[in-house]
Every structure is written in structure tokens, then in C-alpha cells.
Image (spheres, coloured by chain):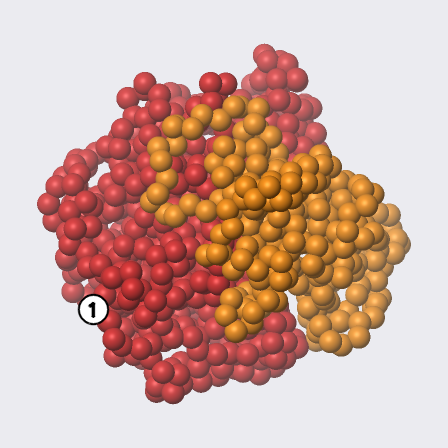
Amino acid sequence: MRLILEVWRQADATSPGRFERYEVDGVTDEVSMLELLDMLNAQLVAEGREAVAFDHDCREGICGSCGLMVNGQPHGPQDYTPACLQRVRTFSDGDVVTLEPWRAGAFPVVRDLVVDRSALDRIIASGGYISTATNAAPEALTQPVNKHQAEAAMDHAACIGCGACVAACPNGAAQLFTGAKVAHLAELPQGQVERYERVRSVVATMESEFGSCTNYGECVPACPAGIELDVIAHLNRDFRKAVVIERRGEVPQRTDVPWLARLRGGPWWQSDPGDAGDHTER
Amino acid sequence: MLEAELDRRRTVGPEIHDAAPTGDIRTMWEEHLLNLRLVNPANRRRFKVIVVGTGLAGAGAAATLSELGYQVEAFTLHDAPRRAHSVAAQGGINAAKAYKADGDSVDRLFRDTVKGGDFRAREADVHRLSEMSVRVIDHMTALGVPFAREYGGQIATRSFGGVQVSRTFYARGQTGQQLQIAGSQQLLKEVGAGRLKLHTRQEMLDLIVADGRAVGIVARDMVTGDIVPHTAHAVVLATGGYGNVYFKSTLAKSSNVTATWRAHQRGAMFANPCMIQFHPTSLPLTSEWQSKLTLMSESLRNDGRVWVPREPGDDRAPEDIPEEDRDYYLERMYPSFGNLAPRDISSRAAKIQLDAGKGVGPLRNGVYLDFRDAIARLGRKTMEERYGNLLELYTDATGEDPYTSPMRIAPGPHFAMGGLWTDYNQMSNLPGLFVGGEASFNYHGANRLGANSLLSASVDGWFVLPWTVADYVAPLLGTDPVPHDHPAVTQAVAEARGRVEHLLGIGGTTGPDVYHKQLGELLTDHVGVERHAEGLAKGADAIKELKDDFWSNLRVVGHGQQLNQELERAGRLADYLELAELMALDALDRDESAGAHFRSEHQTEDGEALRDDERWTSTSAWEAAPPDGVPIRRSEPLTFDAVPLATRSYK
């Protein structure tokens, strides 16, 4: 079939962008959204024109690199599926297909369909982990984990970090992403020690970079990993509890971790550029 | 004829000895640790270490060295450390925990790995791998990896890839993802604490070598195009494997050989480049534009039967081919293992059918994997429970329903056993250059066992490199990283810039992907599942021709001071073209069959790989060709004391 593509072209973060119209012929049903771009790029390169930049890597739905709006929908028309696994067979000959980068204030455009998703990593860097030094771990079986909890942790840990939830959200909120991480670690006994410090810190980072959640739920069908809305409830519950615990003075006031020490003064990467400053370079 | 052909293409250098300590391999690592030098905690911040790659090996090394107090700078070409290709491993990670009463032990994992590698790996290193596997599971559990559990709360294991014990730990079909996420979280923990500097969207273009030591890298900022040097006391490469040289492989699109290949050009030896594993159950190509060979889990072979039509060119739909016209060739050739024959053997058997013109599907490039009998025996529901996701993925990709019509599968290039040569410390022959994970070569010999790749990456990153890097930097106390105006630095930067400008300035008409596809076809034809001397010589010549054409007719659209993915692909392909030549040469040079390297001249009467232990119980480590010369092959003799040499058999 022949498809007409309206593709967002933008030279770099500061240049204005615009839609450009292309035609791709000979598209067969098995072609994925990304292979459609491969076809377009082969055509553009053969004509000596600049190829469309887009993020992609594993092309089997696990790396989370790909992300583009297809006709206004994150990853494409099919729910719960990343762009690399969505095929064009839902389109018909002559259809116009619009391809845009993720739409979110927290994800500035880098070029064409490529955006900067480092804000998600800043959430993780501010507490989305379990602090364990290498070689310090006890024998793994000393801490049995209930099978259902392990399965639930796995459900939440399946997030591929693509950012579709943010792109789908009318508010550009990152609650589904953050909630998934908080819920994953909170389900496991290993995650209990830092549970409430973690949620305070990642929420502070999240709120300083992303919009606020108003429970639209648009994020859920956009999520290729099938993360459920209950992780947001989990996030809110743990956060409220953390605030209460903190007011009672039960959370140790750590000073060795910049993001905790400076929680009240703003997120760590903005607070003191001279010291702990921006350690995530592009 | 072969000798003359070889002498034209390579020379032979002196043998390599002293790569591993001597003594009892069962206590070797512990004793070795005692002999490694230490760095006082207060002095660690005076050392800087560069880690390239943030997969399981890279993230582990970077996070651990940072925790210990070293200044660490980590580089990744991705936008986020989590995306490294370790993320895509599905099945699991082996460890000799012996959580079941099934006779497993450190020594058994060691023996299975040595045998599985068809006796072409280094015994001492493999033993360490098995020993440290135990710590990896403890560590990963502590980091929050949700390993599958039993109802009593214990960690579940499953058996994998033909071994007789249950030692594979898993997190659904996403084990690699979960380990990778845990690793990158530790990396980001160090970033958040202000101890580690992470450079994302930065691609290493060259290694800087000064006075015989690796002292830094040249990296290109993929967004701005700036090419700048970074110097340090030591450099760790954890940049993955090179299977994507075939273009259509199970690897991610950005997987490349540039970091290790550039290091090779700067003096590091490249070991066993011809050793590449073909996975038997990838999806065959269905359209010209299919960009990769998606992997279907090997577990499908538990319930599927592999077959092709008995007669070549049989165009009937599979349902219409009666039983007597079907050839269940794996069951026929390997009655005891049947459809579960090991990877290298299954891939080769499929290739024989394809070559005989019995391939199926529109492009005649696959074999059937049929669930008809399993559905009849177990019911559709059980099949849905066992393989639902995979069968859905197949339907997504092909539009066909594997419940009513057999699935089509084909062998696909998968894992590189070869890589940069290292000693027992994971250090290359260039002092200061460390290598870990798939980028290295030492554990898997001629064939990798299933679920051993996550293991080797984890062991190197978390449990080997942090100790051995310390040993190397310790005597460098009081020295600074090489200044950026050092001639070795300025020259490396100028050369990297020159290369990029050259690529941009060729001004031809053909884009890099077109060349990459052609290279992949040449490799598949000549350096594929089965090789022979004549084809390899022809293939090497054809690759060279393609390389010449590339350098005279390449077109890279756009310019260098921007995000330019065509330029990135062109640079990686330039290195792949050189690697491909060496792969063909190494395959031609290794005049035997071993594991995944199957030379059709060397097979037993019933068609199995025939090793030549007298001549080839060795690793081939290649030095780059001097100007106007040919590559130099050196050999590291291998000894097998703990696991005596034996022939693999799966009949």
C-alpha cells in the first residue's frame, strides 16, 4: 500500500519545527512503525535528503528507546504495544499517518522525533534504587519472598522507561513511571529500609519536572509494559505515610546523600551547581 | 593450497603464555585476590576510571568503583543507561547455587561451560565464572531483582539448554531487563550522590594510547557532534558483542564493534573473531524491510516439532502436506535429543534443509515449528498458558496464527563468543585497557551455553573488574591522567575528527544501510552457520571489494555538528567492514570445526563437528595489520586439566 506521512521535522532543540509530507509506496502489512520510518529514510537518503532522526534500538519491545506519536497516540493505534511491535496493517492504502515526537513539557525535542527523557533518570537517581554496596549482600535465600509479592513486584518492575505514560497524559505527569518504581521496590523486603525516604525524594524530583496527576488514566493503555493504575494509588499511599512518619521524626535525617539533605531546598541537581551539581551530562 | 592462501593473508606471531596464573584452579581466584594490590580508601579519589558501556558489565564496574571512592566517568551511546542491550536477554542467568538436590555444584557449572564451549575457553577463567555466579544471585536479589519464587518463598530455578540440572534463575521472560534495570539503578544512585559522572548520547570513537598504556578515549557527543578526549588512569570497555555485523541479527540496531575495534587498531589483540553463535529459533525474514531477526524463546522447542517438506519446492500449504511427505529432521538425525538438540546443532541442521531447497514460507527461508501435536495432546489452553505471549508476538509479526498453522523459524546470528583478548585480570595486552562482558572473549569458547551471557557480564562487572582495576592503578599513585595537550591525545582526536570528515566527504550515492545489508548477506553466505575454505577465501575477497566500494561511493546525508544517525551508522559500518574481513580470515585460518565454527571439510562421518585438538587447542589472538602488511595471528595454548578433552555427542 501507499501511505502519506506527515512527519515532524526539527533541526535541533532551539530551531522551530514543522510538519513535512512524504509518500511511501510498497508498504506491506508486516512493516512496523519503525520499519515504515526505515523505508522513508532509505528513500530520503537515495534522494540525498536528510533522514528523519528517531530513537530505536532493540526493536522487540524491551529497551524502551522508541517513542513516537502516531496519529496523536503514543506508540500507535494499538494499546499496550510499543511502536517497534506495532504493524501498519491497521492502515489502508492512501491513509495519512502523522508522526510526531513525544508531547510533554519535560521531554524537550532534541531533533525530529528524538526527545530528551533524562528527567526520568533524574527521578531514579534521586532514590529509585536499593542502596547496597557490591559484595555486601547476604545469601539470597535468607529472605524468603512470598510468591504473590514477587509476582506483583515483577508486574511493576516491567516498566521499560519509554515515557509513553507522560506523553499520553494531558498534564504531562510521570506518576505511572514513578509509581511503578516505588511499588516495585516497596513490594520486596529488600526495599523496606529506604521505603519512605525513597518515596519523598522521588516525588520531590518528579513534581519539580513533570505535571500533576489528575487521574485521567490515559497513561495505562499507552503503556507497553502493562503497568496498572494501582501503582499511582500505591505511590500516593506511601507518600502520605512518609509525610506522617517524617513529622513524627522517625525518618533518619541522612546527610551523606545530597538529594536527601537538600530536599527542602529543592531538588539536588538544582540546589548547588558547585558541588553535587548536574552530573548527568547529555 | 590452503597454506599458500593463508600465507598471503596473514602471518603467524609468537605464542602467548602467562595469561592465567598457575596452580589449582579451585583455589586460584582466592589466592590471586591476595596477590592483587590494593588502594587505600583515602587515595581512591585520586584515580580516575573511564567505563564505556552501561550494560550489565559496564554498570556493575562503574557503580562498584564509584562506591569504592574512585572518580568514575561512564559513557553510553543511549539516552539512558538502562537501554543497553543486556536488557533484551530473556531466559535467565545460571548460577551454581545448588538450591535443588539435583547434584549441581560450582564444579559442575564449570564443567558444563567448558564442554558446552567445545573446549576452546580458558579453564581458569571459567572456574572463576562458576564460583562467582553464587555471589551474583545474592547481589541481584539484594538490589531488588524480582526473581521468580516458589510458594514457600524460595527462589525458583529452571533447567535450560540441555543441561541436566536446574540452575537457571529467572524473572519471567525478562531476566536481562530486570538485571539491567537493577544495574543501571545502582549507576544512577552514584550519579545522584554526586560521585559518578554519566555521559549519555556519547559514542567512543577511539582509544588513546600513550607510552604503551591505555590512557583515555575520544568520544563524540551525538547531539552536538563535538569530538573531545577524556583521559583517566584506566579504561574499561564493556561495549557488548558484534553479532549485528550481519545486519539481520537478534541484536539491537545500535550494537556495534567500534569501541573494541578501535582499541584493536591501537594495539589490543582481538580473539576468536570467527566464533559467533546462531540462535535456531529466530523469526525468518518475511519482508524486505524487516529490520531484525526477532528472537522467539528457545523454550518453544519443548512442545513444537521441527519439520520441512520431504521434497524440495513443495508449494502446498503446511496443513495440506500429509504426514508421509514431512521430514521431522531433528527427530530423525538426533533421536535422543530430537527437537531439543543444542543451538549450534539445530541451527546447522536447519541450514542443511534450507540449502537443499526445502525452506518454507514466501521467501523459502524458514523451517516449520509445529504445535499441532502438542495442541492435540495438551489442549489449546495449556499452550496459551505456556507460550501465549510468544505466540501473540508471532501473530503480530506475521499475521499468521500459530495455533492453526505451523510457525516458521530460522537460524539468526546472536552472540559473539569472540572479542578483545584479555588476561586473567580481564586486562587486554594494552596495560590499562580492561574488557568485560560480551566485548571480551574468555568464558564461552566456541559455543555459549544458554543463560551464561548474563552471568559472564555480571561477574566481570560486579565481581572481577573492581578488584583487578585497583591492582593496575595502585602503582600509578601520584600521577595525573594524561593532559589533553599530550601528543597522543591531540593525535587521536585529530584522527577521529579526520575519520568523521572523511565519511561525510566521500560524496557518493549509497547510504550506509545499503552496504550493511550487503555485508550481512556476504557474511551469511560465507561466514555463516557452516563454512569451508573456498567460500571463506571468496567471502574475504568480496568483503574487501565491498569495503573499497564503501569508501568510494558512500553517501552520508547531513553534517557532523548535529544529531546525525546516518553518520553514526556509517562510522560503525566502517569498522564492521574491517571486522568482517578478520572474521573470514580467522574462520579460514582455524582449520578445524569447533562448536559454532563448523568447517564442512572437518566433520565426522555422521556430520558432527570434528575438532583438531592437536593443532587447535588454542585461542587465536589477532594483532592488527601493520601499514601495508597483513594481520598477525598469535596463539594462546589452552590446557584442559580439570575437564579432560572429550567429544560432544547429542545422538
**Foreground pick, A202 / B540:** A202
Corner quadrant of residue B70: bottom left
Give neighbour class at mark 1: few <14, some 14-19, many 20+ (Cα, 10 Å).
few
SS for tag 1? Answer: helix
Residue B109 screen position, x and y as percent:
29, 33
Q: Which chain is orange?
A: A
**Identity of the residue drawn at 66% across and 77% down:** B558
Q: Which residue lies furthest to the left in this view?
A: B23
**Foreground pick, B209 / B322:** B209
Residue B5 screen position, x and y as percent:
29, 64
- The subunit carrying tag 1 is B
Q: In this view, does B456 lie to the left or right of B414?
A: left
**Total residue callouts:** 1
Q: Residue furthest top?
A: B377
Q: Name the residue under label 1.
A: B475
Corner quadrant of residue B378: top right
In the image, what residue type sits under mark 1?
Pro
In the displayed structure, B570 sits above or below A87; it is: below
Residue A264 screen position, x and y as percent:
62, 58
- The C terminus of chain A, quarter of image: bottom right
**Identity of the residue drawn at 40% across and 64% down:** B72
Is residue B450 at all visible to an observer of this figure?
yes
Q: Is residue A90 left or right of residue A34?
A: right
In the displayed structure, B373 sits above or below B128; it is: above
**Identity of the residue drawn at 64% across and 61% down:** A266
**Identity of the residue drawn at 83% across and 70% down:** A18
Is residue B568 at all visible to an observer of this figure?
no
Residue B332 screen position, x and y as percent:
43, 23
- Image colour for chain B is red
